[in-house]
Image (cartoon, rainbow, N blue to C red):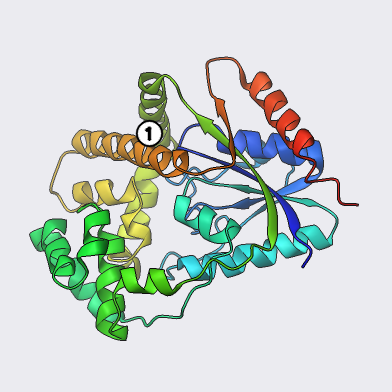
Amino acid sequence: MEQIPVLAVVGSTASGKTRLAVELALHYGGEVVSADSMQIYKGMAVGTAQPTPEERRGVPHHLIGMRDPAQPCSVAEYVALAGACIADIHARGRVPVVAGGTGLYVDSLLLGRAFEETGRDDALRARLRREAEERGGESLLAKLAAFDPETAERLHPHNIGRIIRAIEVYETDGVTMSELQRRSRLAPSPYCTFRVGLYAADRAALYAKIDARVDGMMAAGLLDEAKALFAREDVRGGTAMQAIGYKELAGYLRGECALEDAVEAVKRATRRYAKRQMTWFRREKDILWLEIGMGNFEIICEQAVRGIDNARILCYN
């Protein structure tokens, strides 16, 4: 089987993934495929940092702002959608550049993981979501631990969406998520991938950048986006509303906290997410890690191009 050459840019939020992905796409004649679990939704451009037309610089982007937020996108569905995009890009003689910080999506796409189909129960999801709102994530996590302690051990109480999904799989299919993941197999990957990772040696500087970014999002209309989603009953309790930024502002919209407190919660959640992203990616092998520093983006681009050229994965014509 011929493997399709794919470039990938990974790292934490606010690390410059989109900018580097665009530079690589311009350099090699490519198109960007998003691997962000929330950028796929419409009406969430500000809060999910979907690249603007200016940031895209004429480079085609895929799987961004194309799905109604009332329709959740599973990992398996994402892999199918992204795989179709990559195949089409390659067929047109272009280079696919995957960019994103959702580690599960990146790995599932590029490592060739096969998924079993599992059931869905919207009524159960709604009930569990209400329980989480009333009793907190710890209550749901304890419920999950009763039949799937392995999965419960891996999940944080704030990761409500994953906890609910694990309970839903067990309730609808009678199999635990941990067992399902053991069954899923690593098939031969259809891609020959070169991954570039961006990391911040100065974590304090990254966190300051994240805080400033959240302030910029608020100025750009994040609250208006959150209001629009919150006004939709078919979205309010769903996956999209659990995205960082919208989830915290929902507390303000419910009258549970002041706006400034909600904004501070967004900053805290984003900083924690950045830390989790780096924990995920730093355990991976075969990534060219480049340190992001003030004023050295041109050097990062040069190092990335040098690494890709030396790997010679794009010498396929």
Q: In this rendering, is residue 143 above or below 205?
A: below
Q: In this rendering, is residue 135 above or below 204?
A: below
* Residue 2 in sight here: yes
Instruction: Return the residue at label 1.
Output: 214
**What residue is rendered at 73% in x and 44% in y?**
59
Identify the amino acid type marked 1: Val
**What residue is rendered at 19% in x and 54% in y?**
157
109 on left or right of 32: left
Report the residue that reaches farthest toward the top.
Answer: 295
Front residue (pair 93, 126) = 93
Q: How many C-alpha atoms fall within 10 Å of the one at disc 1: few (<14), some, or many (≥20)?
A: many
Dividing the picture into quadrants, the one containing residue 139 is: bottom left
- Give residue 168's position: percent from left, percent from top: 28, 76
Front residue (pair 36, 316) = 316
Under circle 1, the secondary element is: helix
Q: In this rendering, is residue 22 above or below 249?
A: above
Dividing the picture into quadrants, the one containing residue 300 is: top right
